[in-house]
Image: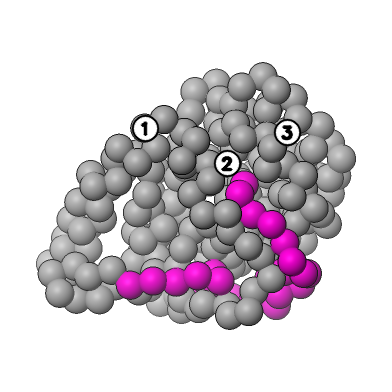
Amino acid sequence: MISVITPFHNCHELLPDYEAAVYGAQVIAIDNASDGETSEKLRAMVERLGHDSVYLRNETNEKYAHANNQGLNAASGEIVVFLNSDVRAHGDWLSAVSTCKRGSLYSPSAGMRLVDGTPIYYLEGYCLFGWRDDFIRIGGWNDTDFPGLYWEDNELCWRASRAGLSLKQVLDFPLEHLSNYTSSRTPGAYEASMANQAVFERIVREGRNAL
């Protein structure tokens, strides 16, 4: 089984495309204090999806990393996908996910950060997948050090690489990301980005110094 883990905060207009994209998987929907209309539609979607899908509600917005860890703890699938809500499928992307191998993390999108001139490769968190036990082995998402949103996927991939996991970009992946759709509609979503960047860079430097 594949478990798809998605934090939601409002933007119920995304649900039809999202539901069509994840049909056939176990979905763990974490409702991060959405409004009443979105919460109602989320519950109904989870019921329709079946496959032991789960609806979890946080009465305050516990943010991305914490919600992802809630989903990881609730997931039943051997393979898990951390997926944003602002996606649209253009093909059977879940079949591609089902072929992923232990010991690697995957995403259709990747990038590079520089920390003190050293390149740090990472996979983008809007669609990040691999075997559940690999995510558990590296401790899941860091939901304690970051004051807000962004850079959490960079830090997770940094730890994954140090733990011996491969980071692999999957090209020609039939899934569209409506980039920053939800963030642009969430007041204050970008405010902690620079602070989170500083946290990430500190973690990298401390990790190097510990070697």
Select label 1 or label 2 by which is in front. Answer: 1
Q: Based on the displayed image, in which of its 4 quarters is residue 8 positioned?
A: top right
Residue 101, by quadrant, is: bottom right
Q: Earlier in the sequence, mark 3 or mark 2?
A: 2
Figure check: 126 above or below 195: below
Q: Identify the mark at residue 188; answer none if there is no mark.
A: 1
Three-letter amino acid code of the residue under disc 2: Pro
- Which comes sooner in the sequence, label 1 or label 2? 2
Q: Which is more toward the observer, 33 or 166?
A: 33
Residue contact at pointers 3 and 1, CB within 8 angstroms: no
Which amino acid is tagged 1?
Answer: Gly
User: Relative to residue 106, is residue 5 drawn left or right?
Assistant: right
What residue sits 44% from the left and 71% below the top?
A: 110
Confirm or deny contact between disc 1 and disc 2 (CB under 8 A).
Answer: no
Look at the numbered disc 3 and give the secondary structure of its residue.
helix
Above/below status of 106 relative to 53: below
Residue matched to label 2: 7
Q: Is residue 147 visible?
A: no
Q: Which residue is mark 3?
A: 42
Residue 175 image offset from top left, x and y in percent = 66, 65
Q: Is residue 98 above or below residue 22?
A: below
Residue 138 left/right relative to 48: left
Residue 17: x %, y % from top left? 74, 50
Distance (Cα) linking label 3 and label 1: 23 Å
Element type where label 2 sits in the image: strand
**Mark 2 Cα shell of 10 Å, populated few (<14), some (14-19), many (≥20):** many
Which residue is rendered at x = 25% and y = 52% of the image?
197
Label 1: element kind: loop
Can residue 204 be seen in this snapshot? yes
Q: Which residues are magenta?
A: 85-112
